[in-house]
Amino acid sequence: MTEYKGMAVERDGDSYTTRRESREALVQTTLDFGPRRDPKLDTTLAFFDHMLEMLGWYADINVDASYEVRTYRLMHVVMEDIGLALGAAAGQAISDRIADGVESNGFAYGVMDEASALAQISFEGRANTFVKRGGASSFERVEDVLCVDLVAFFEGFSQGARCTIQLDLFDDSNDPHHA
């Protein structure tokens, strides 16, 4: 697992908490594999909080994330730093569970209303992110988030987890479910 200055993952039972400190911000994320509960999300970006809540819901994992601004609130930094921290926690959780038979790769096809996507992930020790936006390529913004910054989240996640992520987004309807 890659080490980043100012960032560490701590395990407490089935919970993995990452704390990342930089000149720009203090980030804290938790992936908790225990019983379902309400998430604790305060990233300063409402749509991103919603996206992380849905990620936890569909993955059946409790996802918490907070971002405390120290200098400037830059959206791409918020999303990339939280991605790095969550990725580090996910990478550690996978690494800890491989001996128990957990697969280190997988895929999911998701549908929400008129939006559909294929997500593939492989924890093989290399950080890569490939996003094919298909018909969704015309979107610039969803609520309070730029679509390019959503890509920064997945890039950060893959760097933190040292994994490859491939996302294929389908359809061309103008809807926030495509983000």
Image (spheres, grey):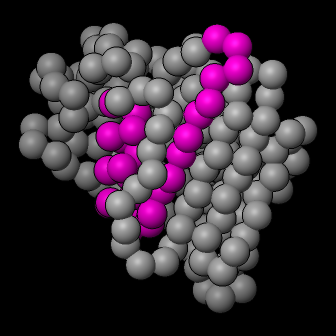
Please check the rendered image and state whether residue 21 is part of the magenta-colored stretch, yes or no: no
- Locate residue 138 relative to residue 96 in the image: left or right: left
The residue drawn where x is 49% and y is 77% is 34
Residue 4 visible from this viewpoint: yes
Please say if 49 is above or below 111: above
Residue 41: x %, y % from top left? 45, 45
Asked where in the image residue 51 lies, by quadrant, the reply is top left
Number of numbered discs on residues: 0
Please say if 23 is above or below 125: above
The residue drawn where x is 10% and y is 38% is 114
- The outermost residue toward the bottom is 100
From which residue to which does the magenta span run?
47-72
Residue nearer the viewer, 161 or 104:
161
- Locate residue 137 relative to residue 92 in the image: left or right: left
Please check the rendered image and state whether residue 71 is part of the magenta-colored stretch, yes or no: yes
Residue nearer the viewer, 153 or 70:
70
Residue 137 visible from this viewpoint: no
Q: Quadrant of the C terminus?
A: top left
The residue drawn where x is 15% and y is 19% is 174
Residue 130: x %, y % from top left? 53, 33
- The outermost residue toward the left is 113
- Locate residue 118 relative to residue 29 in the image: left or right: left
Residue nearer the viewer, 67 or 168:
67
Asked where in the image residue 168 lies, by quadrant, the reply is top left
Please say if 177 is above or below 139: below
Residue 13: x %, y % from top left? 66, 80
Residue 120: x %, y % from top left? 47, 52
Q: Quadrant of the N terminus?
A: bottom right
The residue drawn where x is 67% and y is 59% is 17
